Amino acid sequence: FRFVSPALYANERKYVVRVVGYGYIMFMVGVLISYFLIFPLTFRFLGTYQGRDQVENMISLQSYISTLLMMSLAMGIVFEIPILSWLFAKLGFISADFMRRYRRHAVVIILVVAAIITPTSDVFTLLLVSLPMWLLYEVSIWIVKGLFGKVGKYEKYYFVLKDDFLKNETDKKYLKNCMSQRNVVNLYIIKNE
């Protein structure tokens, strides 16, 4: 950080410290939940799972450690969802309305990612992994909404007034395009014009 810090402005330093700090905390929370809650249940299922009486489970130390590391790393990365949502919203890629509109798609993606993360085939472990991911997605919607709450009011205000004040057809199309894309930069330009 000392190498990069002199090149940043004061407000950029503030954001970098927050993002790195919260990112580290969220990663560690994900690793701890994986280590203390999800991995013991998964390993217990793998240890007691038996297809036939002639086949014995021979779990080696290498497979134990690799499964632990893979699940901890995956859950740590998954717990970065709120940080990434905040960053993408700040850059103007997503909005709270967009996240609400595609919530069903997000749930399907969450279940698929949870199925990839969990090495077992039981539904309980799948739900145990997918529930925190879904909660993080819902928290991300709140974070993005809180970040751009004023912008949402501003968009509605201009949406109501655009027919009265914008007589030029080109201006109406431009404003409608900006509002459909939720482009914060363009809305800011319209506010200043």
Image: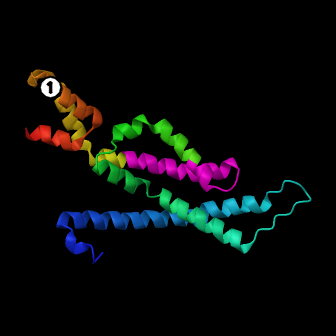
- Quadrant that contains the C terminus: top left
Query: Is residue 77 visible in the rendered structure shown here?
Result: yes
Residue 28: x and y in percent read: 47, 67
Residue position for label 1: 170
Q: Using the rendered view, name the quadrant where residue 34 is placed.
A: bottom right
Residue at left offset 33%, top offset 42%: 95
The amino acid sitting under disc 1 is Thr
Residue 47: x and y in percent read: 77, 63
Q: Does residue 87 lie above or below 111 as drawn?
A: below
Label count reads 1
As for residue 135 lying within the magenta part, the answer is yes
Residue 15: x and y in percent read: 26, 62
How many other residues sit within 10 Å of disc 1, few (<14), some (14-19) or many (≥20)? Answer: few
* Camera-side residue of 58 and 43: 58
Residue at left offset 65%, top offset 53%: 125
Residue 14: x and y in percent read: 24, 65
Q: Using the rendered view, name the quadrant where residue 21 is placed.
A: bottom left
Residue at left offset 48%, top offset 49%: 135
Q: Does residue 151 lie above or below 57 as drawn?
A: above
- Quadrant that contains the N terminus: bottom left
Look at the magenta stretch and give its main secondary structure: helix
Q: Secondary structure at mark 1?
A: helix
| Stretch in magenta | 113-141
Residue at left offset 25%, top offset 38%: 152
